[in-house]
Amino acid sequence: MKNLKSPSIEFSRESPRSRTKEQKADKLRRRDWVIAARQALVKEGISGVSLRKLASSLGATTGAFYWQYNRLEDLLEDVREDWVHRNTDQITKAFEEAGPEGWQMYLAYTRALILEDAIDDRYDNAIREWAHSSKRTAEVLRHVEEFRIEQLRNMFVALGFKGKSALIRARVMYFHQTGYYAMQIVETKEERLENVPYYAEILVDRLDMLGLKGISDVRRYLERQSDACD
């Protein structure tokens, strides 16, 4: 079984303009621009990520942008990288900490999604929408989605499924998750926890949690399994 690391995607690295120490002290950091761009992308889509709007949201001038970046596309590349890490690294860490046992991997994945909110579904949706009009964003999205499905395929292999069976189950599980995001289904954390035993039965053929009595028991089961992995 592969030990998958973060998606292998090359991001451009262009240095900001040179500046004096005095100028550096007064300027926004690149991170500030990335956060503002992320918020605008999630709220308004890529059309909302304009230099003028971002500067206004930060209480800065458009000129301040050029102390950090040479062009808007450089900022957009940082936003793509921000999305890759914010919406992938925590899941990767959960799988790594779970170890090689398939059921523990599944529980770690479930914990990360429900108890730790490891994926910002609005950010995922915004990136997918942006990919319709950006070849580069579509390329990054494709790499990340292939990586996520491979993580799930590895999990199903560890659960004992083989060949196409593991791959198709991984795809079904991932498409189920992204379908939730695309349909913008709203559920409380309690409702999601209540559904966990049934998803485990349907998606991975495990009945372990069906006998649990109520949401509190499901939460304790997930947290107890987490403690067992530490």
Image (tube, rainbow, N blue to C red):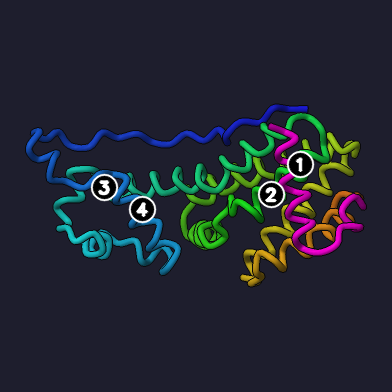
Mark 1, mark 3: which one is toward the viewer? Answer: 1
Where is mark 3, residue-wise? 71
Residue 157 versus residue 209 in the image, above or below? above
Mark 1 → mark 4, Cα distance in angstroms: 34 Å
Q: Is residue 181 left or right of residue 15?
A: right
Mark 4 → mark 3, Cα distance in angstroms: 17 Å
Q: Find residue 32 and report its horizontal and vertical position in percent.
A: 29, 50
Mark 4, mark 3: which one is toward the viewer? Answer: 4
Q: Find residue 74 and report its horizontal and vertical position in percent.
A: 33, 44
Residue 145 versus residue 183 in the image, above or below? above
Mark 1, mark 4: which one is toward the viewer? Answer: 1
Q: Residue at x 14, y 53 (%)?
A: 63
Tags 1 and 4 touching, CB below 8 Å: no
Q: Disc 1 or 4, which lies upstream in sequence?
A: 4
Q: Residue at x 49, y 50 (%)?
A: 137
Tags 4 and 3 touching, CB below 8 Å: no
Where is mark 2, residue-wise? 111
Mark 2, mark 3: which one is toward the viewer? Answer: 2
Mark 2 → mark 4, Cα distance in angstroms: 26 Å
Q: Nearer the viewer, residue 157 or 135?
A: 157
Q: Disc 2 or 3, which lies upstream in sequence?
A: 3
Where is mark 1, residue-wise? 225
Q: Disc 4 or 3, which lies upstream in sequence?
A: 4
| Quarter assignment of residue 143 | top right
Q: Secondary structure at mark 3?
A: loop
Mark 2: amino acid: Arg
Mark 2 → mark 3, Cα distance in angstroms: 40 Å
Q: Find residue 111 and report its horizontal and vertical position in percent.
A: 69, 49
Tags 2 and 3 touching, CB below 8 Å: no
